[in-house]
Amino acid sequence: MDFFQIAIVILLGLAVSDLIVGVSNDAVNFLNSSFGSRVAPRHVIMFVASLGMLAGVTFSSGMMEVARKGIFHPQFFTMPELIVLFLAVMFTDILLLDLYNTYGLPTSTTVSIVFELLGAAVAVSMLKLATTGRSLSEVLDYINTGKALTIIFGILLSVGVAFFAGAIVQFFSRLLFTFDYERRLRRWGGLWGGAALATITYFILIKGAKGASFITSETVVWIQEHTGLILLSSFAVSAVLLQIVLLATRFNILKIVVLMGTFALAMAFAANDLVNFIGVPLAGLSAYKVANATADPLTATMNALAGPVRSNTFFLLIAGVIMVVTLWVSRKSRTVSRTELTLGRQEEGFERFESTGLSRSIVRLVSAVLENTGRLFPPSLRRWATRRFDRSRFRPTPATDGTTPSFDLLRAGVNLVVASALISLATSFKLPLSTTYVTFMVSMGSSLSDQAWGRDSAVYRVSGVLTVIGGWFFTAMMAFTVSSIFATALFFGRAPAAGGIAVLAAFLIYRTHHVHRRREADVQSLEVFNLRKITDWAAATAVTVDHMGTFLREVRRVLDQGFDGLFQQNRQTLKAAREGQRRVQLWSNIIAANIFKVFRLGRWEEVERTQRYAPTISSLQEISESVRDIVVRAHLHVANNHSGLLIEQIAELDQIRAALVEILDHTSRSLRSKEEPDKKTIATCNRELRKLVNEFDQNQIMRIQANRSKTRLSILFYSLVWDSLKIAEQTTYLFEVFHESLRIEETLEERFPARPQTAPAPEPV
């Protein structure tokens, strides 16, 4: 029994770990609408969500039965077999969720726990049958196939239902209020808000009451008998109070709806998903207690686990506190949140996902279907709907910190109300559907209805959604497979296997932690180029000049890596240069988008400057493409194990590199410090570089004639030389244009004093 006592301690420790990684992945989904709409300061949103989670854990008592008997029949297993099964599930769950958190992909804790239980139960059942000499076909007797299929079907169905529910509710809400919703809110806001709050009350209180650990059965019966009265009263009181607020003050009642929705969805999350984190360890503890109460603990079957049980409210509250603390301190949760906000934001900007053939086909198909369907309606009706969805003049109100919301409060309210309603309804039927799937798909459906997926972004957004959904299927496959392997190892290896798996898990989590830190550093590097808080042309121009200096400094570093890796034939150095080259290309695209924003901020008197400023975008692309050409050619040359450069070629290229680096360094420092440019130094460097290029061109011709430089080496040499010269020329052009623009800025400020901006506020980048 010593091993099983230790196993129970391990299970309880894994429960804490699973709460941490699970909340990092899943709980952030109910924060995305509040964060995306900037409804309130971050600490206020977190406080409201924390209260919802603490309240929600007490509603999850009934859900705990899923881990004990929802996937398999416990009466066919002994305590040792169940402990092996539960250990395999918990180890797998922590590793899988931590992996998804690291790469910022929202996955489902419900799907993972269901397929882990299924995989481990199948493995243990087959091993038990094999060791006793019975037929493996009897494995279906051990698995609760009816309940398992119901859960799986419910999860898959929820994906489609959530998407279309979000799309339909958002469509009619936007049709009613339009994007300029604040004016119309005073007329219809009370009714809409009352319906929203009544929906929250219905699904959270009435439907969730059956699973609460603190509500008596008599209270549940009374609530069910007076459902209509409670629902009607909630709607009437909420509608009247909200309408009074609208008429008496200028307060936006959608903030109340969004914060209440955040509370509701946090509550629904805790009620529905707590079983995914502590249900298995508590089931293991129950199995251990039941076995110790029998004469032979190691062989007694677990019939008692098939009966109903109510969880200890104290244990649930402890789990809730751990979840709340994790919510406040977890950095990986913000990584997961960023994915959904990027895919659902209203305005254009940098797209995280690349387009694929499948996403392009889907966009073309849906566009054709919508176009043909639209023809079924009268032209006057189509024109009216088009006007209601017109957002050409709409600009979201900046938040208190100056940042622009990803979407408005109306969409945020729809996301929260629809998602909390669906999740709470499933909880009332004890169906552990995925909160991640529901909140994500509701958000995507409302984004589609809100025309956030325009022609310029649809293929990228669809590609991102497909990537996330593909990850969900990968979750199920990996959960089943890995838990089966772990269960097999634990079945035969017991304590040594548990120790080995624990060491493996610790190592993998350590590795993913470092991967996540590196990825976060990359994201933080992009924040340097953020212009969302800047609305003044002069400030935006000055910041863009600084961005250009940072960009050229990175170009210099990557080129150094590329040349060093080629000279030394070091593949690791060249691999690092390839990563840096991709970063350079990404930065050039972001800076180019920022330059367009600067154009939109400019006054009409600055047309001449803008015409001079515009070609810098081409220069950016030329520099990034030349850097890519140098690094990729060098990497492929070494990776393909071609002959190294001749000694004299290395010496000549090193001189080219030194002259180019001096130009990049001088330009970068000057742009970042806003110093007066030393044109003499730049001109001297350019003349020296051209002189070197001409001289080395003649030397290379002589080497070719002497048959000392083969074709591959000659192509490589000339490519590096001319790409370096191109980078120097484009850098010099940027140097001249940006300093000229700063001088023009000073002149314009003297000739044309600052005045209120009449053009619409710029779109965020």
Image (cartoon, grey):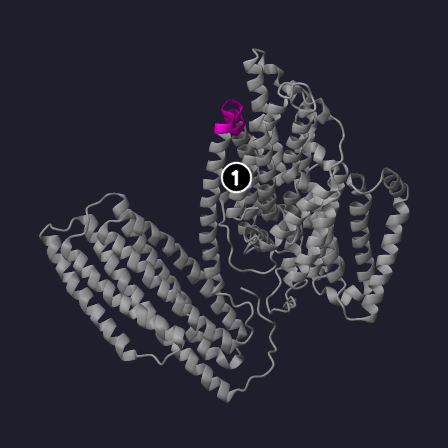
Residue type at mark 1 is Leu
Give the residue at x 58% y 28%.
4
Q: Is residue 487 magenta?
A: yes
Dot 1 surroundings within 10 Å: few (below 14), some, or many (20 or more)?
Answer: many
Q: Residue at x 38, y 53 (%)?
A: 579
Q: 61 or 143, which is in the foreground? A: 61
Q: Name the residue at 79% across, 45% down.
A: 203
Residue 307 rendering spot, x and y as whole percentages: 75, 27
Q: Is residue 179 visible?
A: yes
Secondary structure of the residue carrying tag 1 is helix
Left or right: 657 in relation to 530: left
575 and 610: which is toward the camera = 575
Residue at figure coordinates x 37%, y 71% from the top left: 734
Q: Quadrant of residue 42?
A: bottom right
Q: Which residue is mark 1?
A: 95
Q: Is residue 165 above or below residue 473?
A: below
**Residue 198 in the image: x percent, y percent?**
82, 52
Farthest top residue? 133
Residue 381 falls inside the magenta stretch = no
Marks counted in the figure total: 1
715 sits left or right of 115 in the view: left
